[in-house]
Amino acid sequence: MSYILRPFKHPISVLTLVLILLCGGFFGLQAKDYGGIEQQRIDAVFPGNDKLSEPTGEFKVRTISHGDKLLGYVFQSQDVVDIPAYSGKPINMQVILDPAGVIQDAYVLEHHEPILLVGIPVERLHAFDAKYKGIKADRRVVVGRSSDPEAVTVDGVAGATVTVMVVNEIIMRAAHKVAVSLKLIEDKSGAAKKPATVREDFYQPATWEQLTGNGAIRQLNLTRGQVDAAFKGTEAEGVGNASPDQVNDTFIELYTADLNPPAIGRNLLGDNQYRFLMQDLKPGEQAIAVLGRGLYSYKGSGYVRGGIFDRVQLRQFGNVISFRDMDHQRLSDVFAKGMPEFNEMSIFIVREPARFDPGAPWSLELLVRRQTGPVSGMFSSFELSYQLPEQYLLRPPPSAAELAAIEVANRPTWVNIWYQKAFQIGILCTALAVLMVILFLQDTFTRYPRFLHWLRRAYLIFTVVFIGWYALGQISVVNVLTFVHALFDHFRWELFLTDPIIFILWTFTAASILLWGRGVFCGWLCPFGALQELINEAARKLKIPQYELPFALHERLWAVKYIILLVLFGISLESMSSAEQFAEIEPFKTAITLKFDRQWWFVVYAVALLVINIFTRKVYCRYVCPLGAALAIPTKLRLFDWLKRRKECGNPCQLCAKECEIQAIQPDGRINANECHYCLDCQMTYHNENKCPPLILKNKRKTRDKPAPVPDSAELIPVVQVFKP
């Protein structure tokens, strides 16, 4: 697998590049090596960090700490989401979150994007990544502009729109998944934003066993050995460790429950005690039962001196809720049948300002401290997760805006991109529909050559400006190679759907090849081809001399583009990244995608081709273009011959062959569909009674063989009168 983090900086001459391609040389592969950049980014974000944990959990998240203080979390996107980028391979990024679920850093570690391998400096991508600093993981981020007032918008990278849109999806989806898994944010993709409420009308008798069985009461069991293991590798390692025969002894057995639902509170506390408790609670407050037994006290004695319970705290959505002595009630009597004996029983009140959501997951954190010095110590945290069962809850129906947000969050990446490019898609589909009308009614249009010439010029301008420079819809031979490889290696439709403009053009081109051949794309829809044609036409208007190669040489030079295509395909079998670099023989990226904003040697190459085109029409398309060669191969399968010919074409008439500006008409009069660009000039001549020699001769014969008209009697009267004596 190739890995490129730096821009392509070695100036390779165009001639050398072409010679290497024709000889089948190979670029050397760069080994995958992040070079310690992961730790460098962590140090840049949290300069004082001194501890980085091992990857844990489903998403292999590592915690970043300074002493006892948690600074943040770090992970790589490839461990969280699998979203193919424009190249067909995922982009791997390192993302750093703080404890509040806010992105502090997003950095590309590995990519295979052609536009960035050789084209746009990777520094522009890193500058784009930097815009995500300070964005919370639950926000919606849109590249470009958005009609959603709550969305965060970031500017893209010119020439790499699809790539940065995929990067945006990777960063935000990965950050959201990790933040939800760590309970730093609420999962808004499947639930309403409004907090749930407890069902006060639901009650049924239940035993302790039933309440623990359905999840109404949750439990955490810790042994002394588990606690000792939590301090391993820290300054507190070995402090107060259990002996070998004590490692399985119970350190603490901890239980917790939300007492607000009557089906839980009444069964635990009894009717009277539950009623008095609920009367003391204000709207929005929750009563949390905490029960413990074992060697360790969850209350400790710190709250007696400072008024704060320093061994237990509650966490929800990344917010930490601490308890003071005024939030605590001692619980002495319980009524649940089958309940075990406990050393400590308490009720903690979560006050209204905490904006606690009883319907969302939360956790009770138990903090265990070990002394490392006279006044210093270390904490280790153990988590008891809790989720109130659904039968005890009422969830408000989501609003229309929330439903829309949920829909957006659950869409596949390619669907979001299609929505964001709806305007471009609409214009392109309309233009393709117009082209279809022109092609199906070509016999009618070609009878009006002046109108069709201006219509074609306007369409070519649209192709260059809108399809090429604005929508970046320049198809490349890299797309062909990617498609061929995908057929044999894990074909995924979303790989091709990621760029809607390219996908629509590819679909239309495939259909047009079966009906008309390669000429429709090369003559109407290729932005670089259209640019060449417009420049050459302007040169002809300015009377700049034109030069054509002898047909025998011209016919042999056709083979060059097929050789280049075969070489590129061979290179791609070894390394797709190397093939993407060699595909720079196409000037498309320079002239169209990047609008000549590139290293000087690429610009010189593209400009040189355009200058040659001034004197000889579309030289690159005719002799060099590997994409044209790739499209010409399936042209043999076309179903119809739409271009009309007469038996005199080629023998004796050579008018169309001489006028064909890309020499696609052979001396015998046949049109080579593999080389034809479907400009329809020959069809305009075919229908022109004043230009087509066979048609002119046919009309002359009709006139000559037609008998003279016989005048009627009314017309003879004046003549008789003139000659009357």
Image: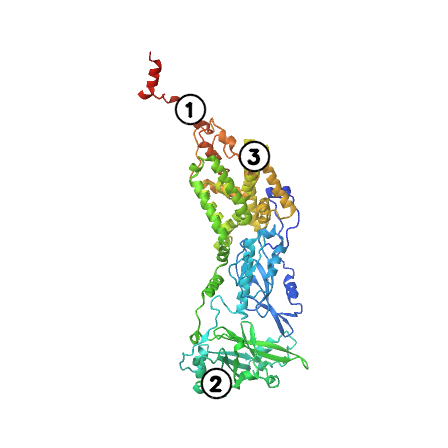
The amino acid on which the numbered mark 3 sits, given as a three-letter code, is Lys
Q: Is residue 269 left or right of residue 575?
A: left
Q: Which residue is drawn at 54% across and 63% down?
A: 174
Q: Position of residue 51 (x, y in %)?
A: 64, 70
Give the answer, above or below, for where 586 lies relative to 270: above
Q: State how far apart marks 2 and 1 are (Cα).
A: 115 Å
Judge whether residue 641 can be spotted in this image.
Answer: no
- The quadrant of the rendering that contains the C terminus is top left
The amino acid on which the numbered mark 1 sits, given as a three-letter code, is Lys
Tell which circle, 3 or 2, labels the residue nearer the N-terminal end: 2
Instruction: Report the disc number at residue 340.
Output: 2
Q: Nearer the viewer, mark 3 or mark 1?
A: 3
Give the answer, above or below, for where 199 lies relative to 102: below
Q: Which color mode does the image show?
A: rainbow
Read off the residue under disc 3: 541
Which residue is more in the foreground, 448 or 698?
A: 448
The amino acid on which the numbered mark 2 sits, given as a three-letter code, is Pro
Q: Is residue 707 left or right of residue 346?
A: left
Q: Where is residue 575 in the image (x, y as percent from the top left)?
A: 57, 50
Which residue extends farthest right?
374
Give the answer, above or below, for where 440 lies relative to 81: above
Q: State how far apart marks 3 and 1 are (Cα).
A: 33 Å
Q: Which residue is drawn at 33% across and 13% down?
A: 724
